[in-house]
Image (cartoon, rainbow, N blue to C red):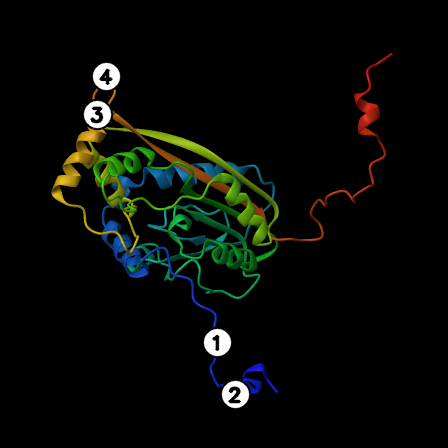
Amino acid sequence: MSRAGERGTSRRVTAATPPEIFDRARRRARRDRAAAHFADAAFIRDWMLEGILERLDAVRRDFTKVLDLGCFDGSFVPPVGARVTRIDAGARFAAMAGGLQGEEDQPHFPEASFDLVIAAGSLDTVNDLPGALSLIRRALRPDGLFLGAFLGGSTLSTLRSVLLEAEAERPAARVHPQVDVRAAGDLLMRAGFALPVADVETLSVRYASLFDLVRDLRGMAGTSLLPSSPPLSRETVARAAAGFAARADAEGRTIERFDTIFLTGWAPDPSQPQPARRGSATASLAEALKPEP
């Protein structure tokens, strides 16, 4: 007999579903809005793809089936001879790239479908990032490679600061929560990747005004997807713009920061290098550190 039966109740207890950080419908709509003129604001994703291609060039092997996850306009060029499948949360981006519409943290493909997965510029707005990474790992064939890049760290630190000052009395969350490089490495390990590497590169961009920054963020589908943020008043926008201008250099330009977290991980395979067995060392560290006579 179940515990519920012993207590004479038929109540069912179910695990609470954690609240989602980002508004999925808003995310799709923002990507659709950005699709038509995305090339005008694609410099962040272009920079990410450049870093991914540099890391891919260092790998001496062939790839035949590639997944471009969060493909935007489909500008990623796969290795020569590889077949590429593209997927994006936005219907217009998916159509432009000749791909499929779908969320990165929802399953779409059988396990072991690809030998290379790249994800440039979309994982920072996925509701279930650990789940998305686990799905990527399962989509890879043994010894398959994942290369990812997304904004994290101290990205948009200037914007965050001026908005906090502008709403000093009642500040609201306006900038997405950011994953730092250490947490990103931990997430790769939790997802089951072998040989995980996470590193960060920073791009500083100088803007003549807050409105130029916002224009770029809209163009790259990078504006807030937080569901609970109230709209900004005109007075708040004016104060934020003044605070942004007050941080300008001698040429009248204010620096905004974009930190890209680069991820590298492999689907486990017995052929990969394995860590040495604990206690298998043949040399003593204490002996090596002794001063020479």
How far separated are the C-alphas under marks 2 and 1? 14 Å
- Tell me the SS state at disc 3: helix
- Check residue 246 in the rendering and tell me which mark sits there, or answer none: 3
> Looking at numbered disc 2 in the image, what kind of residue is underneath it?
Gly
Determine which residue is flagged by label 4: 250
Callout 4 amino acid: Ala
Mark-to-mark CA distance, 4 and 1: 62 Å
The quadrant of the picture occupied by the C terminus is top right
Q: Nearer the viewer, residue 173 or 279?
A: 173
Camera-side residue of 175 and 119: 175
- Rendered location of residue 23, percent (x, y): 31, 58
Q: Residues at badges 3 and 2 in contact (C-beta under 8 Å)?
A: no
Q: Look at label 1 and name its amino acid.
A: Val
Q: Which mark is residue 13?
A: 1
- Which residue appears at 72% of the width and 45% of the height? 274
Seen from this angle, which residue lies furthest left? Answer: 234
Closer to the camera: disc 1 or disc 3? Answer: 1
Q: Amino acid at mark 3?
A: Ala
Q: Cα distance, mark 3 to mark 2? A: 68 Å
Of residues 276 and 40, the one nearer the viewer is: 276
In primary-sequence order, the first of circles 2 and 1 is 2
The quadrant of the rendering that contains the N terminus is bottom right
Dot 1 or dot 3: first in sequence order is 1
